[in-house]
Image (cartoon, grey):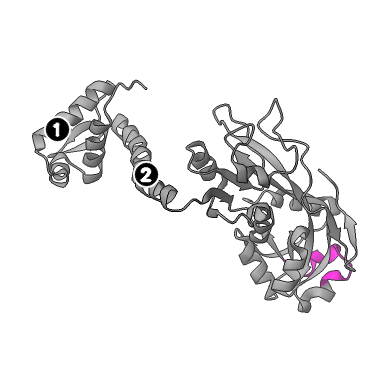
Amino acid sequence: MSLDFSYRHLYYFWVVAHEGGISRAAERLGMAVQTVSTQVRELERSLGHSLLKPAGRGLVLTEAGKAATRQAELIFQLGEQLPGVVRDAVSSPSVRLTVGISDGLPKLVIRHLMQPVMHEPRLRLLCHEAEFADLLADLALHRLDVVLADRPVPAHPNLKVYGHKLGASALGWYACPSLLEAAREGFPQSLAEVPVLLPTAHVAVRGRIDLWFERLGVRPRVVGEFEDSALLKTFGASGMGVFPAAELVHEELVDRYQVQRVGHCDGVEEQYFAIGTERKISHPLVQRLLPPRAEPAADAPEATGAAAIGASRPDRTGTRRRARRT
């Protein structure tokens, strides 16, 4: 690989940017001020742009210097991780899986999505939760093996990632015992009378819920909105309001939160996607997460035609009926 600049020069500049001046950088590096200054000038010469400019009695970053600092941050953060990565690879023959979790995904659903890999005896699982856009950026930098999300890959010509649809789950409405009778009476019109909790708009399914209300001509009595799905369920279970949840985790909802289903949110599904940097997934554990023959479409980054998650949906009486395949 041919480079037009030296990483050593870049490192010295990075220290200067962090320390706020050449003198402090030289002190940290244990080098002469003139030596550090020379290294930075060499980097500027290689890049063809000034990275520092005088300001009062000191120096500040130019726009080019700010851009170079951002890139240097990424480079040297990865470099700092190298000893640990090598040490872990030698000391423990584990199978590492680093997963980005979109903060719009319900926590109970994540456990279901991850189930195919949970019995790997050598698994070393690292989960990072963040906003969807931030996770895609980390994925593009190969900091993550896969991103689990509630939405497909957005159309972007410079975004080299591919979505694989894992499936979908029907949505239901749940309530604690104190609200159950009132919520069931005249459902779903009852949702205009009883208190209702909803996910915030950053969750993909929220738009579908709003359309469902609009289609029914129901104006819900919304008393709370939550970004965190576990917080939504906790407040719902405490009696604050009736709330929507994926029927894929019906049993866990009933057991953990002591709530009951009010009714189905007919026609509304929560969708799940695995997003990676490869059209054909090669990581053996990520392969396990995908339904059989789940490949992205040839003309789009989003996959189509994957099997549905949750092959059955329990009705109010507990009888199981088949859910729609996607």
Number of residues whose C-alpha sits closer than 10 Å to that of mark 1, classed few (under 14), some (14–19) or many (20 or more):
some
Numbered disc 1: secondary structure: helix
Image quadrant holding the N terminus, namely: top left
Residue 169 at what x, y percent from top left? 77, 53
Crowd rating for badge 2 (residues with CA inside 10 Å; few <14, some 14–19, many 20+): few
Toward the viewer: 216 or 96?
A: 96
Whether residue 217 is visible? no
Residue 76 in the image: x percent, y percent?
A: 33, 40
Q: Quadrant of residue 292?
A: top right
51 vs 152: above or below = above
- Check if residue 194 falls in the magenta segment: yes
Q: Left or right: where does residue 92 sit relative to residue 301?
A: left
Asked whether residue 87 is drawn in magenta, I would say no
The residue positioned 52% from the left and 40% from the top of the image is 139
Identified by mark 1, the residue type is Ser
Residue 175 vs residue 320, the one in the foreground = 320
Front-most of residues 126 and 186: 126
Query: Residue 47: which disc?
Result: none
| Residue 177 figure quarter | bottom right
Q: Which of marks 1 and 2 precedes in the sequence?
A: 1
- Read off the residue under disc 2: 82
Disc 2 to disc 1, C-alpha distance: 28 Å
Quadrant in the picture for the C terminus: top right
| Part of the protein shown in magenta | 183-196
Which residue is drawn at the image coordinates 78% and 59% (left, top)?
A: 247
The amino acid pointed to by label 2 is: Leu
Q: Would residue 57 be visible to someone looking at this image?
A: yes
Q: Which numbered marker is on residue 37?
A: 1
Q: Position of residue 130 (x, y in %)?
A: 53, 51
- Which-is-in-front pick, marks 2 and 1? 2
Query: Is 105 situated left or right of 18 in this image?
Result: right
